[in-house]
Amino acid sequence: MPYKDKEAEKARRRKYYLEHREEILARSKEYCASNREKICARMKIYNASRREEQKAYMLAHKEERAIKAKIYRETHRDELLQKRREKREETNKKERETKLLLRNEVLDYYGGVCQCCGESTKEFLCIDHINGGGNKHKQITKGSLYRWLKKNNFPEGFQTLCHNCNQAKHIYGVCPHKRVPQ
């Protein structure tokens, strides 16, 4: 070994690298380009072995990690709560936008206006089961009616109504707009 002093050896290698940096980087880039498959195969093997090592470490140090995590959560409580709030607000905003887009898509497919009175303001519109049975259908779908309609390719038997007409149809059996005058 030319240098018994590790620091001197490290300094010599550093100096050599700095003097020949461009050549070293060019050789490295050339090697990577010509041996891509070989490098990828080695990385897969290495990553698989690291995963096993990590699992073993996690199992062996489970209690120690739990204690460290608890201490970290206690000392950084406010930061973590703030991050959680921000993430929740961001997620809620994305979910609202997604639900609104889906709702508008379904309403547009079924006409986009109340089939009874002609109301076209989206906020006032909803989907109605033409032959009734909405409560039974809600128990079967267990979720968003709009998602179910899109997933099932917008089946027949549904129509767009405004909330007023939908409620009147539910309570009185027919919307007041459709009643025959007496």
Image (cartoon, rainbow, N blue to C red):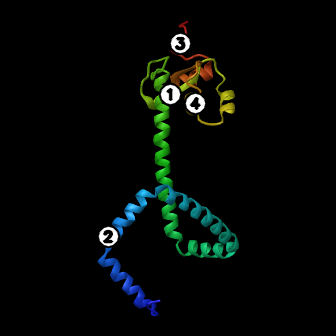
Question: What residue do we see at 64% from left, 26% from top?
Answer: 134
Disc 3, SS:
loop
The amino acid type of the residue labelled 1 equals: Val
Query: Mark 1–mark 4 contact, CB under 8 Å?
Result: no
The earlier-in-sequence mark between 3 and 2 is 2
The amino acid type of the residue labelled 4 equals: Lys
- In the rendered image, residue 170, in percent from the top left (x then y), is placed at 61, 23
Q: Identify the residue under disc 1.
A: 106
The earlier-in-sequence mark between 4 and 2 is 2
Near-viewer residue (79 or 35):
35
Q: Rounded to the nearest whole Å, what is the CA distance between mark 4 and mark 2? A: 58 Å
Would you call the spot at circle 2 few (<14 residues within 10 Å), some (14-19), or many (20 or more)? few
The earlier-in-sequence mark between 1 and 4 is 1
- In the rendered image, residue 50, in percent from the top left (x then y), is placed at 60, 66
Q: Horizontally, is 64 left or right of 122 in the view?
A: right
Question: What residue do we see at 47% from left, 93% from top?
Answer: 4
Q: Horizontally, is 172 left or right of 35 in the view?
A: right
Disc 2, SS:
helix
The earlier-in-sequence mark between 4 and 3 is 4
Near-viewer residue (151 or 165):
151
The earlier-in-sequence mark between 1 and 3 is 1
Q: Identify the residue under disc 3.
A: 178
Q: Classify 148 as above or below 119.
A: below
Q: Which mark is residue 23?
A: 2
Query: Mark 4–mark 2 contact, CB under 8 Å?
Result: no
Q: Identify the residue under disc 4.
A: 151
Question: What residue do we see at 42% from left, 87% from top?
Answer: 9
